[in-house]
Amino acid sequence: MKYLDTIERRLLADPNMGVPGFFEPLLRIWQQHKAETEDAFPSYSRFDVLDIPPRLISHLILCKLIGTPRRFFYEVVGEAIESHNGFPAAKRFLADVPLKNKKVMAREFGLTVLKRSAIFSRGPYIGQNDYVKEIERLICPYRIDGETFAFVTLARFALDETAMRDATLRVDRLMGVGLHKSV
């Protein structure tokens, strides 16, 4: 079994800290919202999905930390992510989706609140399809109210195109979904 933990993590508290170009539009939006508040977290009411370039929407995740006990709930999961995961995750609690790395994801979301910063991280991804080798993600924390948080995330997969061609799924159907890195 592959090691599932994060292999790279960058706290993005410094506005000059960079991320790969794919993630820059979301980071700029979050930094702008953060600069407009005196709180450590921008208000979730400031986020508008229409501010994200349309080409990134299929890579968007909107997650909330809600309830008692506190649980991560996926409101929206983009088509590129669900296609490569092999299962729907929207409108489900993180604990209820069949991800092998859900503890890693919960920790990454939680660290953004603990560190009061957006986080860029990267690590191996083990999903239903072996051709998905790695995931990169930018997680930006927002405050809904009090101690209720939302996380606006972009995720991008690194795909092994040879393994993808050998998969039983139709390659042309999945290659057209979103933007990816080849390994």
Image (cartoon, rainbow, N blue to C red):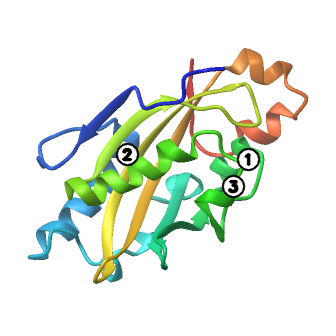
- The C terminus lies in which quarter of the figure? top right
Q: Can you tell which mark lies on residue 83?
A: 1
Q: Secondary structure at mark 3?
A: loop
Pick the front one: 32 or 67? 67
Pick the front one: 51 or 4? 4
Q: Which comes sooner in the sequence, label 3 or label 2? A: 2
Q: Label 3 belongs to which residue?
A: 97
Circle 2 packing at 10 Å, graded few (<14), some (14-19), many (20+), is many
Q: Secondary structure at mark 1?
A: helix
Tell me what residue is drawn at x 69 percent, y 55 percent: 97
Nearer the viewer's eye, disc 3 or disc 2? Answer: 3
Q: Label 2 belongs to which residue?
A: 23
Q: CA distance from mark 2 to mark 1?
A: 20 Å
Q: Secondary structure at mark 2?
A: helix
Dots 3 and 2: beta carbons under 8 Å? no
Q: Left of 59 or right of it: where is 140?
A: left
Q: Is residue 7 visible?
A: yes
Q: Is residue 42 above or below residue 27?
A: below
Q: Is residue 102 above or below residue 77?
A: above
Q: Is residue 83 above or below residue 39?
A: above
Name the amino acid type tagged 3.
Val
Tell me what residue is drawn at x 72 percent, y 36 percent: 175
Q: Quadrant of residue 88?
A: bottom right
Q: Which comes sooner in the sequence, label 1 or label 3? A: 1
